[in-house]
């Protein structure tokens, strides 16, 4: 790898705006967003509902074209989806005509992984995501939580250097959510990939990420950066109970509340 590539951000978002024109009305979702994510870091985006979090993630994923500005991954300008950027959508889109195993195998086959290796990886992720016995089921026969686990397995299985996750654990019960959060941290420890996580769960943002960015109400911009630096060697229990965790969660919560309140003030003016 040359020096330029080594220095490049994993993700660079520069001056990104996005507006939608419909029936003569313009909705501005994003307004001049700048964000740089270093390789191997874990970044959370939080903010009021409708502030443009998903839109920003999909700009990076290459599914939404910005109206202004650019997004780049490892120094290369994003102009469509790419295998180095694995996305888990809020609606955990699965291929309905493929079984659980074939959904998980999909990206591996696209990458040209051999049949034998694909079968091994699929088996590993079926076990990790607690999907044993459902390999040959179709998505329509699964609960929402199980579909979400298949979507996560499908994306994790290819171990992309950049993971873009849009509220990935929302449909899971509390115990499974905790298990999945820790599975994500394990995965990150093993591969040191770069993580951009959209979530409305402030505890999740603080627990999983080393930087939390708070977005303003729509049109979305970044209004605050909070550095986390928790030691995950201490384990979930002691982190969750620590004073530091409480302070950080409170700081993020207050910043989001300010944005939500601003929205209310405007509506009542
Ligand atoms: N395809 C689209 N067409 C029109 N408006 C859209 C589209 N996608 C998103 N929006 C609007 O952009 C704003 C931001 O949406 P979104 O990124 O989904 O917010 P968040 O994920 O933070 O809840 C919302 O007002 C939403 O209605
Ligand atoms: Mg969203």
Image (cartoon, rainbow, N blue to C red):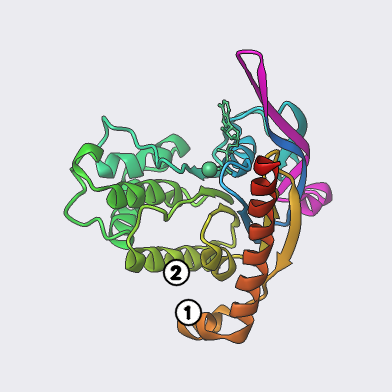
Residue sitting farthest toward the front: 269
> Circle 1 — which element?
helix
Contact, mark 1 vs mark 2 (Cβ under 8 Å): yes
Q: Residue at x 38, y 68 (%)?
A: 179
At which x and y percent is residue 200? 53, 55
Left or right of 90: which side holds 218? Answer: right
Q: How many marks?
A: 2
Whether residue 261 is situated above or below residue 219 in the rendered picture: below
- Specify the segment rendered in magenta: 1-27
Residue 56 visible? The answer is yes
Instruction: Indicate the secondary structure of the residue bearing disc 2.
Output: helix
Q: Residue 71: x percent and y percent?
A: 72, 37
Mark 1 or mark 2: name the one nearer the start of the chain: 2
Residue 221 magenta: no
Q: Position of residue 78 (x, y in %)?
A: 68, 33
- Asked whether, in this view, residue 257 is left or right of residue 36, the answer is left
The residue positioned 34% from the left and 57% from the top of the image is 172
The residue pinned by badge 2 equals 182
Structural crowding at the residue carrying mark 2, measured as other residues with C-alpha within 10 Å and reported as few (<14), some (14–19) or many (≥20): some
Q: At which x and y percent is residue 101? A: 27, 44
Tag nearer the camera, 1 or 2:
1
Left or right: where does residue 260 sit relative to residue 116? right
Q: Is 63 or 202 nearer to us in this picture?
A: 202
Quadrant of res 95: top left
User: Looking at mark 1, is its residue's CB closer than 8 Å to ligand 2?
Assistant: no
The structure residue drawn at horizontal position 42% and vertical position 43%, both measured from the top left corner, is: 113
Mark pair 1, 2: CA separation: 8 Å
* Residue position for label 1: 236
Q: Is residue 8 magenta?
A: yes
Q: Is residue 36 visible?
A: no
Answer above or below: position of 123 versus 81.
below
């Amino acid at each position: 790898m040359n020096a330029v590539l080594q220095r490049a951000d994993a993700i660079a978002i520069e001056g990104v705006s996005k507006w939608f024109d419909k029936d003569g009305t313009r909705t501005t979702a994003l307004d001049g967003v700048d964000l740089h994510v270093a390789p191997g870091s874990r970044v959370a985006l939080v903010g009021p509902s409708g502030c443009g979090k998903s839109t920003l993630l999909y700009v990076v994923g290459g599914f939404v074209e910005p109206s202004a500005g650019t997004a780049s991954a490892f120094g290369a300008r994003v102009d469509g989806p790419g295998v180095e950027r694995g996305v888990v959508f809020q609606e955990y889109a699965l291929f309905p005509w493929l079984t659980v195993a074939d959904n998980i195998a999909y990206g591996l086959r696209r990458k040209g992984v051999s049949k034998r290796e694909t079968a091994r990886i699929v088996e590993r992720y079926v076990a990790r995501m607690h999907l044993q016995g459902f390999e040959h089921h179709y998505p329509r026969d699964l609960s929402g939580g199980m579909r979400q686990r298949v979507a996560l397995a499908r994306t994790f299985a290819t171990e992309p250097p950049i993971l873009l996750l849009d509220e990935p654990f929302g449909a899971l019960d509390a115990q499974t959510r905790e298990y999945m959060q820790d599975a994500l941290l394990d995965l990150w420890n093993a591969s040191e990939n770069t993580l951009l996580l959209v979530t409305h769960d402030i505890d999740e943002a603080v627990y999983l990420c080393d930087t939390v960015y708070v977005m303003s109400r729509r049109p979305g911009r970044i209004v605050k950066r909070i550095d986390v630096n928790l030691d995950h060697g201490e384990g979930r229990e002691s982190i969750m109970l620590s004073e530091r965790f409480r302070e950080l969660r409170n700081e993020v919560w207050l910043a989001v509340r300010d944005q939500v309140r601003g929205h209310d003030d405007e509506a009542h003016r």
